[in-house]
Structures are given as structure tokens and as C-alpha cells.
Image (cartoon, rainbow, N blue to C red):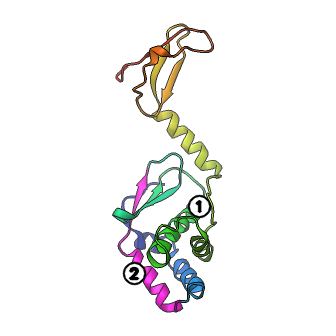
Amino acid sequence: MSFSPQPLLDFLEEEGLRPTVQAGLRKVASEFNRDEVEFAAAGIAVLEGWTLRPSRALTRYGSIVPGTKTLRLTVLDCSPEARRDTILHEVAHILTGALIAEGENHGPRWRKVAQALGAQPNYAGRDARFRRASAAQRSAREKVVARCKGCGFEVKRLRRSSREWGRFQHRACGARFEAVEPNR
């Protein structure tokens, strides 16, 4: 999936999730001794300032950055169910933090909101399509950072390494490693 940064409420509208969020807020309002209509309106008002941005992260579907009011959503391929669940999961974080308890993360109050929105109140990283796309991206981004002087085995990492590779010995052949220059 490819998309450009956009207001979160516009995205929720496009995906047909805004009514789901409103209904979930009305459903959970009584749990927190709030009026259903006012609580749902307050929740939508909170989401107005948020922006949805693509994320190149390889290990998570989504995340929020409260300081910049940004919800990041993976651009990697995953099932529509996993994408929907991730969006609702992250929206539950935004709403819980703004309306109920800041810093609640995955606590009991957040779980109530997540369930009311229809999100699974746990980590949903079991989507096979996402795992395959993540593995492909990881291998495409990996760089050779060290090479065995004896057998030529290459050590690959996503980021360059500042280790002193000459100190390490390759278990398979016993030879030492040498660092590989960044442009090689």
C-alpha cells in the first residue's frame, strides 16, 4: 500500500472507519462515566489535529508520535484485516491518551477502548503477508559490514557498524573478520 501524508480523519472517512470509531466511543462512554454523544464528539475532535504518515518500519504495523500528532502506518503489504486492526489499535492509543489516561499504553482502560473500537487488544504481528514483505525489505536494505578473511563469509546489518571487527573470530573457519568500507 502506498499513500501520502494526510489528515487522519480524512483517511478514516475514506476507509469507512469513522462511524466505527464514533460507535465505539459511544459504546465505551458509560465505562468512564461520560455522556455517549459528548464523548464521541470529544473523540472526533481529538483526532482532528492528527496526521497519518507512511512508515518504512520493518517490525511494526503502526505507531503514534504524540508530540507531532502523527500516526505512522506501514507501507509494507499486509492483509486488509491486519491494516484495519492496526489503524483502530493506534486510534485507541490516541483516544485513551487524550480522553481518559495519558500514558496508559496497553493497560486495562486502553484495552476497553480498543475492544469497543473493534481492535484486538494485543500485538497483531502474525500476518504472513507482512512477514514476507518485511523480510524482503530487510534483505534489500542490508549492507555488508564485515567479511571473514578466511572463507569470505559476510556479516550484514541494516546500519553501518562501528565495531572493531578485527577482534572477532569466525566460528566456522577460525579466521578473523575485517571491516568493509561503506562504499564497497
| Secondary structure state at the residue bearing disc 2 | helix
The residue that appears at 55% across and 8% down in the rendered structure is: 175
Residue receiving disc 1: 80
Say left or right for 139 vs 49.
right
Q: Which mark is residue 113?
A: none
Residue receiving disc 2: 45
| Secondary structure state at the residue bearing disc 1 | helix
Pick whichever, 171 or 180, lies toward us: 171
Residue 120 coordinates in the image, percent (x, y):
64, 66
- Mark 1 surroundings within 10 Å by alpha-carbon count, few (fewer than 14), some (14 through 19), many (20 or more): few
Residue 17 coordinates in the image, percent (x, y):
52, 74
The magenta region covers 34-55
The residue that appears at 56% across and 9% down in the rendered structure is: 151
Residue 57 coordinates in the image, percent (x, y):
47, 48
- Image height check: is 74 above or below 68? above
Say left or right for 139 vs 68.
right
Marks 1/2: CA distance? 26 Å
